[in-house]
């Protein structure tokens, strides 16, 4: 029965492949990727276990040994698909490059047309596409190294920035738009004075860097123009994009530890970003450039969803494999890339809100204000098969740590417990600062899959609300919506 | 003492980095790569052994266990260097892109100038560069998988073709030159008739493929023009380039098995290719396009030599590490890439002559015409510490196999030995068909490092002769030399 379904999917996928329709072909490739990953994971699992890529699932009664790093299968399948997709995405130009009359009767004609007015191949788009694949492949390699060798935290934190370098160079060459829009209400009264000071500082630093490097980061023509008010960040915009490419993979990696959560949150995020893309793609009034960026984003997200859903089938409770850091880095970088290349890196941050909340919430432990145990996963109770919050112990309380925990406790953001020690000392125990534990503190013990589902549904609801906010409150705050205005 | 030398190298490297001089910066990066690999290999060796990337050196008295796959360190260092090199290679355009007056007083101005006449960024060059790095990174990943999982022969043989796909797409878009020059003397009398038939066949196949794909592979304007006579191969030229990207990595991987040989031959090959590049780069009469292709090649080869020399220091007899399939694939693909992107893939084949000879010589074993043992490495003799030829046994001789071996033996290309079995049967033993064994057959037992050195010196001599032949007999045969003629 399941084989008939897979055979049908395969037939549909092959039928959908069409040179002139990149979105449709991306969807077909997504189906192919889904099927490939579905077939590959069981076939390679033993090889992975054999070379030591395995781990114990501590949240199961018998703690089975599962293959690790299975996200590698998804990542490699995705990369191969994206390489094969190139001729389809650029098909019109491959034809028109040598054959002019192929141009006339194509629905694909309107897409990407901004650059092709002079009928030349859009090398800049190809460079962007290639740098995106290159960046993703570097990230996959980095993730694999982390799974194989357990790279030190301080090394792996910054390595994504190197991976994203080709992307930044292409950005510099192709767009060099480094301005951000400031909400007009901030520019009233003292606001504009403050922005003048900030602008003065940014301009100074940029002039210094430009003098040293010989490059040019700011246009200086559009600095602090009004309606809409723009602030040209120059080099800081590149630092900001680097930061996105560091933050996005790491934020996925931090919100992890229960079956299905890493892949689940990635799929939800991809769906939310895709919904946002289609807000633009179905609109008729947006600029060609905005249309192109969101088409780029959709082309990268659709096959990603395919290879991830197959992985989720194996990683969902009770998991038959772990996804590994490879998957977290890889998926995080997919989001960073579509954010940067799709020119909506600020919007991306809104959709990463659950990850940001989890990161900020965990900061006291990450910076060791309160103690941080090696693992902060929730605790599995063998008796009832449910997950309970895991706790850290405040052995040496000081004003900062106990004060912080008291405040969090008052806000119902942490569960505090007094523990009697052997020598009648009391130790303060606190639920570990992750939103996974917080969910358990709020809702009581849950089975692992329910816990995962609760977090994913919350993420989906937040995401959909954010899309709505983005296109209602956003335009009101900023005085325009690029759905109608269009980025240049 | 050695630290002072390294410190000096580092100082020189940093001093040499200059935005306007890509070749000089590539040299500086080569030094940096050398130092990085030199420091990294001892630091990561234990981690590699720990996860099972290790092997026994069978050609040593005590068969020490050495870390495997150390070529990965060279490959990753190289990839990071090549990413950081991008802004230096394209510096002029990064500046001129926003700042026109930076153009006037630069020695770099003449380089790459062909495309920049209209003062636009050469996105096609960037796309070429990025696709080359992408292809190399895919190949490194593939090599790593092979070292980790022992991929099946039939899988790993064709995977480099997928890795090279972005390269072929960029070639299609940017050059689409698919013609090869035919020596004029072949075009006399019956020769021209034969070529008309060949051309008819090629044209037919291309029309069919073009009809099916909608793409266009042949220009059909320059088909079989004379002086110099050209044959437009169309789609076959892409198949040929794919074949190069498959053959080059595998040919390095086949000529292997003794300390230092994999890296040694790669360095020699890189030096030969670099010499050939400089023949063009110092010439004043060549076209800008030919200058650019060979500059591209040199920029990719110089850092490669740096990271390889450091690896050789650890891999030279007595080896402290193995390089792994990763290095063979990686280095083979570097050559394929400079051959394809530098537009001298046919010349590349001349320089790969020792590898081709080794491959052709080994074909009877690879295709099991005569038996092929699992390993064909020479045999180490503990008593005298020398290497002796290893032998295969012809248990069931037939006309083809014994006839072939007799012919080879007459030509002194194999050593045959009769072996008396237990039941008075005689088995024919033959030295394994690799040029490593043949060297030992010809020169008698040698120590491992002497053996390696003999092969490397032979390779260097062949290579240098080939450069000389390429620019003397080549022009005479083909009626022109692109040193003066220039590829368009």
Image: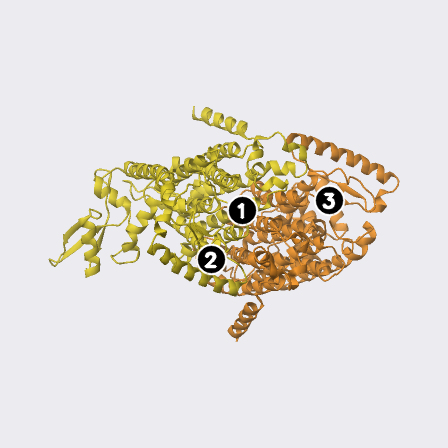
Chain colours: A yellow, B orange
Can you see residue B51? no
Q: Position of residue B90 (x, y in %)?
A: 59, 56
Whichever of callouts 1 and 2 sits on the residue coming sooner in the sequence is 1
Which quadrant is the N terminus of chain A positioned in?
top left
Can you see residue B55? yes
Q: What's the chain of the residue with tag 1?
A: A
Instruction: Residue under label 1, please give it.
Output: A128
Q: Position of residue B408 (x, y in %)?
A: 74, 49
Secondary structure at badge 1 equals helix
In this view, the residue in front, A163 or B317, is: A163
The residue most toward the front is A189
Report, in whole angstroms, how far the alpha carbon at label 1 lies from the one at label 3. 54 Å
Q: Position of residue A111 (x, y in %)?
A: 55, 36
Instruction: Residue under label 2, please give it.
Output: A235
Q: Tell which tag, 1 or 2, sits nearer the viewer.
A: 2
Report, in whole angstroms, how far the alpha carbon at label 2 lies from the one at label 3. 69 Å
Is residue A167 found left or right of A409 in the rendered image? Answer: right
- The residue carrying pointer 1 sits among few (fewer than 14), some (14 to 19) or many (20 or more) residues within 10 Å by Cα, namely many
Q: Position of residue A400 (x, y in %)?
A: 21, 60
Q: What's the chain of the residue with tag 2?
A: A
Q: Tell which tag, 2 or 3, sits nearer the viewer.
A: 2
Q: Is residue A455 above or below residue A418?
A: above
Q: Quadrant of residue A464?
A: top left
Label number found at residue B475:
none
Is residue A472 found left or right of A128 in the rendered image? Answer: left
Q: Tell which tag, 1 or 3, sits nearer the viewer.
A: 1
In this view, the residue in front, A416 or A457, is: A457
Is residue A32 found left or right of B197 in the rendered image? Answer: left
Instruction: Residue under label 3, please give it.
Output: B404
């Amino acid at each position: 029965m399941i084989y008939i379904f897979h055979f049908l999917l395969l037939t549909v996928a092959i039928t959908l492949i069409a040179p002139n329709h990149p979105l449709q072909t991306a969807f077909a490739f997504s189906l192919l990727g889904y099927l490939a990953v579905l077939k590959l994971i069981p076939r390679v699992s033993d090889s992975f276990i054999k070379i030591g890529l395995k781990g114990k699932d501590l949240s199961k009664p018998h703690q089975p040994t599962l293959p690790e790093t299975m996200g590698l299968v998804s990542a490699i399948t995705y990369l191969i698909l994206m390489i094969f997709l190139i001729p389809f995405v650029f098909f019109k130009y491959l034809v028109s490059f040598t054959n002019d009359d192929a141009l006339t009767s194509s629905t694909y004609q309107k897409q990407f047309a901004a650059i092709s007015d002079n009928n030349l191949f859009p090398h800049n788009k190809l460079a962007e596409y290639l740098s995106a694949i290159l960046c993703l492949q570097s990230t996959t390699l980095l993730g694999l190294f982390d799974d194989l060798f357990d790279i030190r935290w301080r090394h792996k934190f910054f390595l994504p920035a190197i991976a994203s370098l080709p992307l930044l160079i292409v950005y510099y060459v192709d767009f060099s738009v480094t301005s951000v829009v400031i909400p007009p209400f901030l520019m009233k009264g003292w606001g504009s004075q403050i922005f003048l000071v900030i602008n003065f500082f940014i301009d100074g630093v940029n002039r210094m860097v430009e003098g040293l490097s010989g490059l040019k980061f700011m246009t200086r023509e559009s600095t602090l123009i009004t309606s809409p008010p723009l602030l040209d960040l120059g080099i800081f915009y590149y630092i900001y994009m680097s930061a996105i490419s560091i933050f996005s993979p790491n934020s996925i990696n931090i919100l992890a530890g229960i079956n299905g959560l890493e892949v689940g949150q990635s799929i939800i995020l991809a769906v939310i970003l895709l919904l946002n893309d289609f807000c633009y793609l179905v609109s008729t009034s947006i600029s060609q450039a905005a249309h192109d960026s969101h088409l780029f984003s959709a082309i990268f997200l659709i096959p990603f969803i395919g290879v991830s859903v197959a992985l989720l089938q194996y990683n969902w409770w009770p998991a038959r494999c772990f996804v590994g850091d490879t998957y977290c880095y890889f998926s995080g970088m997919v989001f960073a890339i579509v954010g940067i290349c799709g020119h909506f890196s600020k919007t991306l941050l809104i959709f990463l809100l659950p990850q940001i909340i989890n990161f900020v919430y965990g900061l006291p432990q990450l910076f060791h204000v309160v103690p941080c145990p090696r693992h902060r996963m929730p605790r599995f109770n063998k008796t009832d098969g449910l997950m309970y919050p895991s706790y850290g112990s405040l052995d040496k309380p000081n004003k900062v740590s106990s004060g912080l925990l008291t405040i969090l406790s008052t806000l119902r953001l942490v569960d505090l417990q007094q523990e009697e020690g052997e020598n009648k000392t009391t130790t303060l125990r606190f639920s570990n600062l992750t939103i996974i534990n917080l969910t358990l503190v709020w809702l009581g013990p849950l089975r692992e899959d329910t816990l995962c589902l609760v977090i994913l549904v919350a993420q989906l609801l937040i995401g959909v609300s954010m899309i709505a906010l983005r296109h209602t409150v956003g335009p009101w705050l900023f005085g325009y919506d690029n759905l109608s205005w269009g980025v240049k």
